């Protein structure tokens, strides 16, 4: 049939991957159409992910820091929380960013088509909105449809007291007691927000540690810090039964040393995210999608179909915005005929909890599992003047070096603002920096960033103490 619209590049999904691909392609001279099912562009990250969660975490941080100062001579009293106003502020932050994106799209003449898109064949996508269909013909396409929260069959997800991260960001109600199912980054960030707002938090995690993926010694100070504030933190435990009752959701736990069935006013389920690859009729375009909904790509972000690319959460782990944007640039550049490919050595992970937990590149547990030789240089924040002046001393910075070349292989930090420190480690790994490069780089004093240089000096045996 005839198409309603034509473009050089169609981008399906407007998250960090999709809008970056669209903007870069437009800058390289392609006629671009960006298809998004929601009115607001920006995807999960801007609307219901990275940004709103960080706004609420900031509020939580202010509340907690103010409370901590009460012991040091500055007492603000009990905070008065206006949930409506807090939500409004969070929505304003989102609005500024998504509105800004729409402006950037207009400036670049990227056309935004609102509607849910599916492939009709390998050169057409059909979008649908309020029953009205639009057929778009494309020369090339980028699939950037992202992911959505995983639901578990034995949890009553249709009960309004059972929330996913999107629901939790709405701050609809502050229960007396809430269970967070899943001790990964997303669950623990939301736990942080609700705890700061006065909710009693229990956490249940199937594996034997919080934040699976990070090294245990890095997670430990975080675990200790939150254990003081939360109710129960149950690792190595399965929440196996959920029953909706009037007085709450009754949850049964399986594992060693677990409590009996417990009632919760709300449950937050954060057990991972599932890719949306299976919902776009990709087969009609000949694009392979695996049984979980992931789409395999090569280093140029091409799917098995030469002129169709895929990026972001839908191509696999780690499901992070900064991975999606870098992949989006590569896809756009390759689509525009450039010789580009994705070759990041490392992708940092950050939990914006209090304290923050961040890691990049090789971890010690991976090194041990794979038999990779390494040596550690680390620095306890209890010896950092800056950390102590923040009223905190639990942090650690840890660097992993190649024993033969002294090059940095991986790094991690836990403590306030650890997420900011990880960027320097990522740069050092990308640049092939060794311990001497890092240690001889003059870092500003007093900053937490010094702990990176001190860790390198500790590895080299040249560390003197500077408070
Ligand atoms: P998405 O952002 O998922 O966007 C996909 C878009 O495609 C969506 O807008 C969707 O509506 C649209 N779409 C899907 N199917 C169709 C269709 N058929 N037709 C039209 N449109 C469609 N990552 C970080 O790096 N840092 C963080 O701090 C962080 N915090 C997070 C906090 C939370 C609570 C959550 C849930 C996630 C967080 N993430 C964070 C992860 C991050 O949001 C994702 O990695 C990122 O959004 C992935 O980008 P994407 O472009 O692949 O897809």
Image (cartoon, rainbow, N blue to C red):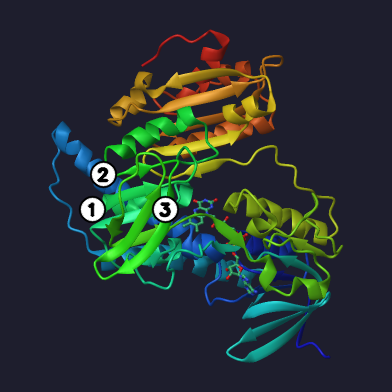
Residue with the mark numbered 3: 239
Q: Earlier in the sequence, mark 1 or mark 3?
A: 1
Could you give the CA–CA distance between mark 1 and mark 3, rounded to whole angstroms?
23 Å
Relative to 238, say whether 175 is above or below. below
Return the mark for residue 198. 1
Could you give the CA–CA distance between mark 2 and mark 1, rounded to whole angstroms?
10 Å
Q: Which image quadrant for residue 276? A: bottom right
Q: Which image quadrant for residue 36? A: bottom right
Residue with the mark numbered 2: 64
Which residue lies at the image location 66% right of the left edge and 24% below the top edge? 433
Q: Secondary structure at mark 3?
A: strand
Q: Earlier in the sequence, mark 2 or mark 1?
A: 2
Confirm or reject: label 3 Cβ below 8 Å from ligand 1.
no
Which residue lies at the image location 84% right of the left edge and 54% below the top edge? 338
Q: Position of residue 367 (x, y in %)?
A: 64, 26
Indicate which label's residue lies in the foreground, 2 or 3: 3
Q: Which image quadrant for residue 324? A: bottom right
Relative to 217, say whether 27 is above or below. below
Crowd rating for badge 2 (residues with CA inside 10 Å; few <14, some 14–19, many 20+): some
Q: Earlier in the sequence, mark 2 or mark 3?
A: 2
Confirm or reject: label 2 Cβ below 8 Å from ligand 1.
no
Crowd rating for badge 1 (residues with CA inside 10 Å; few <14, some 14–19, many 20+): some
The one nearer the camera, 19 or 274, is 274
Indicate which label's residue lies in the foreground, 2 or 1: 1
Q: Position of residue 128 (x, y in %)?
A: 64, 85
Ligand 1 appears in which quadrant?
Answer: bottom right
């Amino acid at each position: 049939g005839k198409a309603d619209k034509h473009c050089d590049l169609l981008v399906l999904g407007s998250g960090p991957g999709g809008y970056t691909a669209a903007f870069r392609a437009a800058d390289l001279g392609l006629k671009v159409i960006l298809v998004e099912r929601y009115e607001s562009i920006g995807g999960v990250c801007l609307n219901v992910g990275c940004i709103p969660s960080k706004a609420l975490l900031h509020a939580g941080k202010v509340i907690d820091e103010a409370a901590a100062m009460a012991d040091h001579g500055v007492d603000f009293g009990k905070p008065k929380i206006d949930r409506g106003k807090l939500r409004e502020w969070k929505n304003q932050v989102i609005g500024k960013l998504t509105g800004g994106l729409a402006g950037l799209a207009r400036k670049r003449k990227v056309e935004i088509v609102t509607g849910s898109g599916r492939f009709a064949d390998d050169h057409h996508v059909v979008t649908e909105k309020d029953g009205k269909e639009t057929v778009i013909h494309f020369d090339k396409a980028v699939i950037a449809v992202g992911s959505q929260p995983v639901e578990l069959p034995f949890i009553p997800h249709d009960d309004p007291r059972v929330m996913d991260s999107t629901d939790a960001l709405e701050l609809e109600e502050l229960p007396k007691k809430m269970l967070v199912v899943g001790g990964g980054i997303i669950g623990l960030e939301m736990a942080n927000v609700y705890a700061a707002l006065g909710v009693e938090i229990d956490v249940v995690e199937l594996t034997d540690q919080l934040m699976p993926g990070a090294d245990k010694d890095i997670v430990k100070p975080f675990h200790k810090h939150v254990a003081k504030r939360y109710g129960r933190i149950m690792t190595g435990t399965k929440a196996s039964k959920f029953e909706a009752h009037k007085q709450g959701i009754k949850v049964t736990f399986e594992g060693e040393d677990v409590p009996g069935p417990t009632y919760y006013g709300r449950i937050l389920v954060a057990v991972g995210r599932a890719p949306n690859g299976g919902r776009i009729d990709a087969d009609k375009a000949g694009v392979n999608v695996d049984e979980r909904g992931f789409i395999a790509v090569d280093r140029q972000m091409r799917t098995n179909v030469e002129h169709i690319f895929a990026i972001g959460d839908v191509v696999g782990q780690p499901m992070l915005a900064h991975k999606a944007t870098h992949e989006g640039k590569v896809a756009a550049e390759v689509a525009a005929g450039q010789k580009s490919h994705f070759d990041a050595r490392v992708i940092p992970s950050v939990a914006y909890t209090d304290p923050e937990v961040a890691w990049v590149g090789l971890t010690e547990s991976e090194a041990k599992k794979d038999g990779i030789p390494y040596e550690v240089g680390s620095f306890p924040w209890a010896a950092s003047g800056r950390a102590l002046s923040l009223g905190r001393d639990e942090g650690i910075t840890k660097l992993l070096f190649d024993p033969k070349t002294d090059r940095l292989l991986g790094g991690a930090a836990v403590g306030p603002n650890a997420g900011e420190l990880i960027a320097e480690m990522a740069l050092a790994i990308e640049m092939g920096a060794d311990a001497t490069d890092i240690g001889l780089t003059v870092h500003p004093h007093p900053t937490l960033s010094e702990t990176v240089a001190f860790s390198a000096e500790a590895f080299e045996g040249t560390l003197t103490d500077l408070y």
